[in-house]
Image: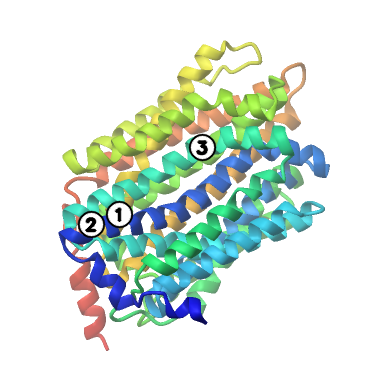
Amino acid sequence: MSAHLHLPSTAAIRATLAGPSGRRRRLAVLGICGLSLFMTYLDNTILNVALPTIQTSLACDLTALQWVMDGYLLVLGSLLLLAGSIGDRLGRRRLFLFGVLVFTVGSALCSVAVNLGTLVAARVVQAMGGAALTPTSLSIVRDVFRDPGERDKALGMWGGIFGVATACGPLAGGLLVSAAGWRSVFWVNIPLGLAALVLARRFVPESRAPRPRRVDPLGQGLIMVFLAALTYTLVQGPRDGWGRPLIVSGFVLAAVALIAFVVAELRQREPMLDLRYFRNMPFTGANVIALLAFIALAGFLLVNTLYLQQERGLSARSAGVALLPATVAIAAGGPLGGWLVARYGTRPPLIAAGLFITAGSAVLLGLSPSTPYVEIAFAYVLLGAGFGLVNPPITSTAVSGMPASQAGVASAVAATARQFGNALGVAILGGLLTIKLGSSTGPHLLSNATHLPWACLCLDGLAVTAVAVFTTGQRPRDGGGAGSVSTTSLEGKRVAGH
C-alpha cells in the first residue's frame, strides 16, 4: 500500500505535462508508450528468425508453423477495436498497464512451451496483452501532445519506433537463438515489460473519451468470426485443398460475417466502428496502405527467413546479420518518413514506399541459392526503405483524421489494419510457398518456390503506390483535410441522433 501512496495522482501528472516546461515529461510519456510498441513489434520480427529452429525443435510442417505467427496475429487483430473502445471508456492508462502485464506473462509462458499447441496457446495470451497495448499507447500520445504541430512530430516518432524494433529484431533473434535456443527470444520481453509497468504507473496520466461509445458485442463477435474464418482458410487451404468442404465453408462464413458486420454497424446507434468515418479518403487510404504494406512486410520476413536458413544453409545468427541491410533501411526510413510528413505531407513518402517495395521485390524475382549476396542486399535496402517510410504517414493520417473523442477507435482501426496485414502476409505468402513446394520438382525447390511470392509483392507495392496517389493530399486535422468528410460533424450528428 505504501508504494501506492507515493505514486502521483493523475491530476498531478497532468499538471507536470502542461506548457513548454512539461515538454520533457511529454517526451518521457512518448518514450514509455514507444517502449510498449517496441516490445510488441520486436516480438514479431525477433520470432521470425527463430521459426526454422522452432520447426525443427517441435517437429512441425510449414502450415503448422504459420499458426505460431497467425494464432497471435488473429487474436490481436480481432481484439484491437474492442480494446480501443474499452480504453476510451474505462481509462487508457489502466488498459495500458493491463496490456503490459498480460503481454509479459504471455512471453514467459511462451518460453516454457513444451509443444506446438502450448506455444500457440501462450501466443494467444501474448496477443490479448498486445491488443490492449497498441491502440491505448497511441491514444495516450495523442492525448498528451495537445499542440497539433508537436503532436504530428510525436506521432511521427511513435511510428518511427516500428523501424527501430524491426531493425533490432532479426539480429537480436539470430544472436539469441544461436546462443541460447529459440525460447530465449521471448525472454527479452520480460525486463522490457517490467520497466514499462513501473514507468507507466509513475509518469502516464489517465485519460478517457468525454463520451465513449457503448460496447458493441454483436460487431465484436462478427469481426472475430470474419478474421478467424478467413485466416483459417488461407492457412489451411494450400495444404488441405481449396475444394474441400471445410475450406469452402470457411470462405463463405468469412463473407457472410463481413456482410453482417457492415449491416449491423450501419444500424447500430453506437457502433464499435462508425463506418461513416471511411468517407474520409485520407483515413481510408491510410488504412488500406497499412494493410497492403504489412502484408508485404510479413510475407518478406517469412519467405526470406526460410530461404536464408533452409536454402542457403545460414545459421540463425548469420541470417540475422544477412538481413541488416533491410533492417537498417527500415530504421532509417522511419525518421525520414516522419520528417517528410512534417515538411511535405503524406503523399511523397507513401508513393516512395510503394515504389521501393515494388523495386525490391522485382530484384528478387529470379532468386536462387547462388544469387550473389550483393544483389540480395540491394533488394533488402529497397524493401527496407519502403517498409520504413510507410509507417509514419499512415499513423499520422489515420489518427489525425478522427475526432479526439474517438482517439482509441482511430488508433485501433490503424492497428487492426497493420495486424490483419501481418496475418494475411503470413497466410498468403506461406500458402503460396506451400503450393509451389508441392508442385515443384528438381533441385532448389525453396528458392524456386519464392518466385511467385516475390511477384505478388511487386503487385502489392504497385497497389500501395496507386492508393497513395488517389487518396492522399493535405493532411487531415481532426476531421479536416483534403478529400475528407468532417469527422467532427459526423460525431455531432451521431450525438444529435440520440
Mark 3 or 2: the one toward you? 2
Label 1 amino acid? Leu
Q: Is residue 20 left or right of residue 261?
A: left
Mark 3 highlights which residue? 168
Q: Is residue 474 left or right of residue 126?
A: left
Q: Of marks 3 and 1, which one's residue comes earlier in the chain?
A: 1
> For the view shown, which residue lies furthest in the bottom direction?
498
Which of 305 and 174 lies nearest the eye of the viewer? Answer: 174
Label 3 amino acid? Cys
Q: Is residue 346 above or below residue 310?
A: below
Q: Position of residue 54 (x, y in %)?
A: 75, 41
Q: Secondary structure at mark 3?
A: helix
How many marks on residues? Answer: 3
Mark 2 residue crowding within 10 angstroms, few (<14) / some (14–19) / many (20+): some
Does residue 254 appear in this view? no
As measured in the structure, the alpha-carbon distance from the residue carrying label 3 to the one carrying label 1 is 22 Å
Residue 409 falls in image quadrant: bottom left
As measured in the structure, the alpha-carbon distance from the residue carrying label 3 to the one carrying label 2 is 28 Å
Which of 332 and 4 lies nearest the eye of the viewer? Answer: 4
Mark 1 highlights which residue? 27
Residue 25 falls in image quadrant: bottom left
Residue appearing at x 53%, y 70% in the figure: 222
Which of 362 and 385 lies nearest the eye of the viewer? Answer: 385
Q: Is residue 389 above or below residue 90?
A: above
